[in-house]
Image (cartoon, rainbow, N blue to C red):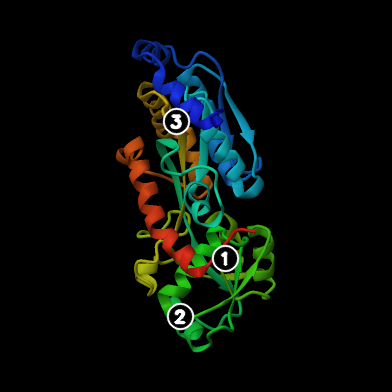
Amino acid sequence: MQLPRRRFLQLAAAAFPAATRIAMAQSYPSRPITVVVPAAAGGPTDTIMRVMAERMRAFLGQPIIMENNGAAGGTLAVGRVARAAPDGYTVGIGQYANYVLNGATYPLQYDLLKDFAPVALLTTNPVLIVARAATPAKDLKELIVWLKANPGKASAATAGVGSPSHVATVFFQNSIGTSFQFVPYRGNAPAMQDLVAGQIDVFFDSPSNSLAHVRAGQIKAYAVTAKTRIPSAPDIPTVDEAGAPGLYVSTWHGLWVPKATPEDVITRLNAAVVDALADATVHSRFTDLGLETFPREQQTPEALGAFQKAEIEKWWPIIKAAGIKAE
């Protein structure tokens, strides 16, 4: 009987003598490390890893090779990490869409919690609630009143079925007790084009994509979906301040390795991440991109594991109740 590749690798790792695994961890890394990116080159996830890669290379003493594959919502790339040898030479970066949302919207061939070992939380990016410039509401409370008074009439843009913006808008819709017409686009950029043109009413979007249009007066920003205001737009209130308490949504990123990767290897990778996130140049670049890094005490494998599990428990019931299935 032939065993599936993933199961074979897991059994092989478990069979390694302890001394062999310790020796491997002590010499790690002795060759280049491949980071699998479940997105196209040039996108936010790719950019985050490239910003960190040079500092991590200096810390680890080995090159970081980027491997991009955004097909099928990044599920193929994440599957590649799940099936890789658990030796620390194949690492996966991803955002919460890849390691949380996809588990409820795609029929995956891997388990997001059981087939990976967490390494570290990296960055977080709250979302802005924005609307077309001609929207009559002057603040979020008025926007909610207007939306509730016109159920099914307002149009809400999404970056595609099952995308973070789609799920966030469903969360908002459920929270305020009304309904929207969802209009899926192929990404944030075309959705923003139609919002600026006044053809769409509401959009949940990243600050990096929206703020230039807000500052130009082309669209309105009503709130940031976080507990605190963001440094890049301190004048925009939080959802708690604006009238939708608890409506927290963030696009966060983390780093994972295949299950059964030796603990010493994970510790080494985590130390490289912590070093990179503490670097002034890396921090400055992330600030320019509108990204925040997680506090030092949350940059641990344990924190990522707990956070990912909590996010799954939060978002999967919302997705399944709405019947969202990726195309």
First-in-chain label (1 vs 2): 2
Q: Nearer the viewer, residue 18 or 223?
A: 18
Element assignment for label 3: helix
As drawn, which residue projects farthest toward the front? Answer: 1
**Residue tagged 3:** 276
Decide: marks 1, 2 in contact (CB < 8 A)? Answer: no
Give the residue drawn at x 64%, y 37%. Answer: 68
Q: Which amino acid is tagged 3? A: Ala
* Three-letter residue code for mark 2: Ile
**In the rendering, at what x and y percent does residue 192 appear?**
64, 64
Where the N terminus falls, by quadrant?
top right
| Residue 205 in sight in this render | no
The residue beneath circle 2 is: 144
Callout 3: few (<14), some (14-19), or many (20+) C-alpha neighbours within 10 Å? many
Residue name at image x 51 percent, y 25 percent: 85
Name the image quarter holding residue 33: top right
Which residue is under mark 1?
Answer: 214
Q: Is residue 33 above or below residue 111?
A: above
Q: Residues within 10 Å of mark 1 (few under 14, many from 20)?
A: some
Picture coordinates of residue 260, whole percent (x, y) = 41, 28
Residue 298, x across and y down, in percent: 33, 41
